[in-house]
Image: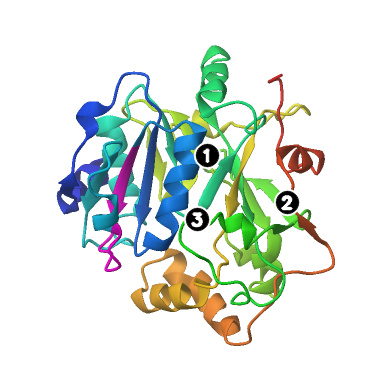
Amino acid sequence: MVRAFRKSYELNVVQNNTARISKSDIILVCTFRNEKIRLPYFLQYYRDLGVDHFLFIDNDSSDGAQAYLSAMEDVSIWHTRGSYKRASFGMDWVNYLLHKYGHDHWVLVVDPDEFFIYPFCDTRPLRALTDWLHASDIPSFSAMLLDMYGKGRLDDAPYQSGQDPLEVTPWFDSGNYTCKQNHEYGNLWIQGGPRARMFFKDRPNKAPALNKIPLVRWKRGYAYVSSVHAILPRGLNKVYDSQGGENASGLLLHTKFLDTFGSKAAEELARGEHYANSQEYIAYSQQINNHPELWCKWSERYINWRQLEVLGLMSKGDWT
């Protein structure tokens, strides 16, 4: 939190509609850079889900995203030219805004390429989930990152702004995941999926982490640790049942692999602002010119959340 307050001076208000936030509102926080093409559907999806207000942190975009978001009454925007890496990969900025505006709210922290799903999301709004969590005294809710991809080369199906990304990336790995407990924070550490088998096949232990805790009933004093993978106080990371049962959980459908992936990966590699000296983007760059195809004979086509529960990738737990 000391870092968060120090880094708050890098945030410049562009549009502040936070006075419109009511006591019961669900807040979404998102940090982005040059993601204008994704924003129309992103906003539509989360508004339909039940998000009431968006806090956007624009890390010096040059594609007009900020202008696109302006004049939206449920959107507040901060701009920064600060280093994403030196701000704990954006978490210092996020923690500051959550400290200032998130107290006693349910908050959802996601990236522009992530789409949150949960049990009964096709028939129940997000507020039904948060009401159940609150009544059950459950302050945090987990969602594994599920990488989605298309069939064929990544640039075979161009993405159009406003389009549902799942129309382009409807496939996923139903298995190929490892899970262990991180003893430092008590959270689960999950790896695997198409990025592990394609980009990190020779060193799967270095593959990106897939575990996230994106939905929290926020209190002052809470803080994410370098990413949404872990949170403090440590008790908030206990989102799983260690006695053989199942806690309710969701998924973040991760639509990174659009036709824009190659140029985006090159930009981020050049910036060098990502975790572990950008080793993830180094791995991408080593493969991208070969036009890798993520689809394989074991790939599953996404249908709905019930399919994912049957596969063991999420659970409704005790929620009925």
The answer to whether any part of residue 234 appears in the image is no
Amino acid, disc 3: Asp
Quarter of the image with the N terminus in it: top left
Magenta region, residue range: 54-65
Image location (x, y in percent) of residue 133: 55, 20
Among the 4 quarters of the image, the one containing residue 241: top right
Task: Judge whether residue 301 is colored magenta.
Answer: no
Residue furthest right as drawn: 297
Work out whether mark 1 precedes mark 3 in sequence or the reverse, and give the earlier one.
3
Q: Residue 17 carries which label?
A: none
Amino acid, disc 1: Ile
Residue furthest top as drawn: 135
Q: Which mark is residue 213?
A: 1
Helix, strand or loop at mark 2? loop
Q: Name the residue under label 3.
A: 113
Q: Looking at the image, which residue is at 42% across and 52% down?
A: 40
Judged by depth in the image, the label closer to the viewer, 2 or 1, is: 2
Neighbourhood count class around disc 3 (C-alpha, 10 Å): few under 14, some 14–19, many 20 upward: some
Image location (x, y in percent) of residue 268: 40, 72
Q: Looking at the image, which residue is at 42% across and 62% down?
A: 37
Q: 67 and 136: which one is in front?
A: 67
Q: Is 99 situated above or below 69? A: above
Quarter of the image with the C terminus in it: top right
Q: Looking at the image, which residue is at 54% across and 15% down?
A: 137
Task: Judge whether residue 64 is colored magenta.
Answer: yes
Work out whether mark 2 precedes mark 3 in sequence or the reverse, and give the earlier one.
3
Amino acid, disc 2: Tyr
Helix, strand or loop at mark 3? loop
Q: Name the residue under label 2.
A: 302
